[in-house]
Image (tube, rainbow, N blue to C red):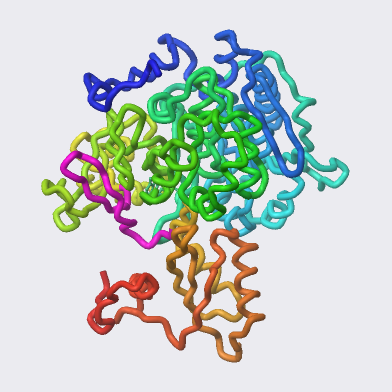
Amino acid sequence: MSNIKSYEERLQGFDWDYAKEVLDWQDGELLNIGHMCSDRICAKGHADKTALIWEGFGDATAQYTFNDLRVLSNGFAKLLQDQGVEPGDRVCLFMDKVPALYVSFLGALKMGGVAQPLFSAFGDDSLEVRLASAETKAILTTQKHVKKVRKILDKLPALKTIIVVEGNPAKLKDGELFYDMNEHRVEDFECFQSGPESQSVLHYTSGTTGQPKGAQHVHSSVWGQALTTSWVLDLHDDDIYWCTADPGWVTGTSYGIIGPWVLGVTQCVLDSGFTAARWYKFMQDNKVTVWYSAPTAIRSLMRDGDDLVKKHDLSALRHLCSVGEPLNAEAVVWSEQVFGKAFLDTFWQTETGAMMITNYPGMKIKPGSMGKPFPGITAAVLDLKTNEPVDEPGTVGLIAFRPGWPSMFREYRNQHDVYRSKFVGAADDATPEQCRLDPDLWYVSGDRASIDADGYYWFVGRDDDVINTGGHLVGPFEIESALIEHEAIAEAAVVGKPDEVNMEVVKAFITLHKGFEFDDMLELSVMNFIRKSLSPLAMPQEIEVMEKLPKTRSGKILRRYLRSIEWGEDAGDLSTLEDD
Ligand code: WT7
C-alpha cells in the first residue's frame, strides 16, 4: 500500500503537522470535530458517501451518508441551542450504540457543547456520580434507559434538559422532550467557532482511590487521532472499518467516531450482544476491511473455534488492531492462522486520547509486545525507586510520556491535585497547563512495562489497584462504596481475580453485619445490587465472606495482600505489612 513506511522513515523529521497533510487541511479552517466529521467531508465532495452502516438486534439495519450526518447533527445542535444549552455545557449521551448516539455526538460538538458519552449499562449510582461531577446540563437517552435518569434527578440540580430518543412519546414524563432524529434535519447551522483549546469530549475513568475522574479533552486532539488513524489503523478512502468499542469508552469516540470520520471513511456499527457467529456474519456481509477490537473479544472468538471462521468469507479483511488489555502472543499467532493477519497491539489510555505505543504496518512485529512509541511521542520506563528512565533493557518500571502531545487530556475535571499527581517532577502549585507544557516532566501512566534492546515495549501489569475486566477499567473504591450500602455488608475490599477470557473479573471480600447469614440468596442479592446500581462489569463474580478484613495497623484495608493471594503470588508476611 502506497502510504506504508518503515518505523524509521516515519520518525525522520516527524512533525504533528503531518496530520494536516493526511486531512488535506488548510490553515484558517474551522477546528471543530463535529464540523470536521460531517460538513467538511461533504464540502470535499463526499456528501453521498456512506458514513455509517448500522445493525442492531434482530435484523434492524440503517445506513447514513455523510450528508445525513451533516443535516442530522445540525438538527441536534439546533435542538440543544433551542433548549438553552450553551457552549461549554456538558451534554451527556446515555444510550446503546444506536445511530442517534453518533449523530448527537457530532451535534453537541457543533454547538460548542462538551460531549459526555456514558456506557448505557451503567446503573443509577454510576450515572449519578458522573453527572454530578460533570454538572451536566442536558442528557440524551432512550426510553430503555430514561428510568435510571428519573431516579436520580432530584440529586442533580444542574441537569435542566432531558431528551428521549426512540420509544413512545406518550410515555414521557413532564418536562422531558421527545426527539425523533428524522424530524430534525437542518440544512444550515452555524457551528461554534471552537479553537484548539476548546473543550470537546469528557470521559470518566476509574482510579484506585476516590470516585471516577473526568478526563477533559479538547478539539485539537484531532491531530493525534487523525494521524494515528491514518498510520496505525491504515484507513484509506475505500475501506469499510469496524471498531467494536462502545463510545461510552474512549476507544469508541477517538477511533469509533472521530478518527474514521475526519478522514471520511465508511464505518460499521453492530449494536447487539456478542456472539462469534454474529460478528463473523457482520464482517462478511459488510465486507469489513479494517477491524479494531480487544483481546477479550479475540479470546472469546478463539474459544469458539476455527470452524466457525471457515464458514464465513472474511477475505475482505486486510488489517487488524487491538487495544485495552495485554494482547497475548497466542492470540496474535491464532489470528494469523485463521484470518491470515496478525492483530497489531496498540497501547493508550483515556487520558492520552490517542494511541501512544503501537505496532503498525511497516514495522517489524514481535508477538506479545505493544510495539514502540508512536512518532512524536517521547516515552520511557521509569525506575520504580528513582523515577529516572531505566537504561538496562528488560528492567521493569513505570510507563511514562513527556507531556504535550496533541490529544493529551487537559485536566481531571475539578481535580487539579490529582492531575498534578500524575506528573513526576511537577511543582506543588503547578497549573494543569504548566504540567502539560513542561518538557522536563513525565506523565506517568499507571502501568508497568519493560523495554527490550530493540526499543520494543512489553507490558507487565498495572501499578495500582484498578481492575481491567475485558478491557474496561473499574475502580475498586467505587465498588467497595456501593457494597457497604447493602444492608448486610459491614466492610468490603475489592480486587481483580484472574479470568481466562476477561483477564480479570471482580472479586469482593466482605464482612457481614451481625444477624446476617451468608447463603445463596444473599450472594445473589449482593451481586444484583451491584449490577443494578453500578454495572454488570462491576458486579463481583465471586464473594468471599471473612471474619475480618486484613488491615494495616492504622486500619487501612490491605487490598494488595488479598490480590496477591488471588493471583497465587507471594503475599509476604502480613504482620510486617505497613502503611504506605
Ligand atoms: C488502561 C487504559 C485507550 C484504550 C481503552 C482503555 C490498559 C490499554 C493496553 C495494551 C496492555 C493495555 C492499561 C491502560 N491497556 N491498552 N495494549 N496492553 N494494557 O482505556 O479505560 O483508559 O484504560 O488499559 O492498563 O492504562 P482506559
Q: Which residue is rendered at x = 57% and y = 48% of the image?
A: 307
- Does residue 95 appear in this view? no
The x, y position of residue 178, in whole percent, is: 79, 37
Residue drawn where x is 45% and y is 69% of the image = 494
Residue at the image point whose x is 28% and y is 28% from the top: 375
Q: Quadrant of residue 376?
A: top left
Q: Would residue 27 be counted in the magenta stretch?
A: no
Of 294 and 222, nearer the camera is 294
**Is residue 576 left or right of 446 when viewed as pictured?**
left
Residue 341 higher or lower than 67, as above or below: below
In the image, 560 versus 420, the foreground residue is 560
Total labels: the figure holds: 0
Q: Is residue 451 magenta?
A: yes
Q: From where the camera sits, is residue 154 visible?
A: yes
- Find residue 419 and report its horizontal and vertical position in percent: 35, 47
Residue drawn where x is 75% and y is 38% of the image: 165
Tell me if residue 293 comes above or below residue 239 in the rendering: below
Which residues are drawn in magenta? 445-467
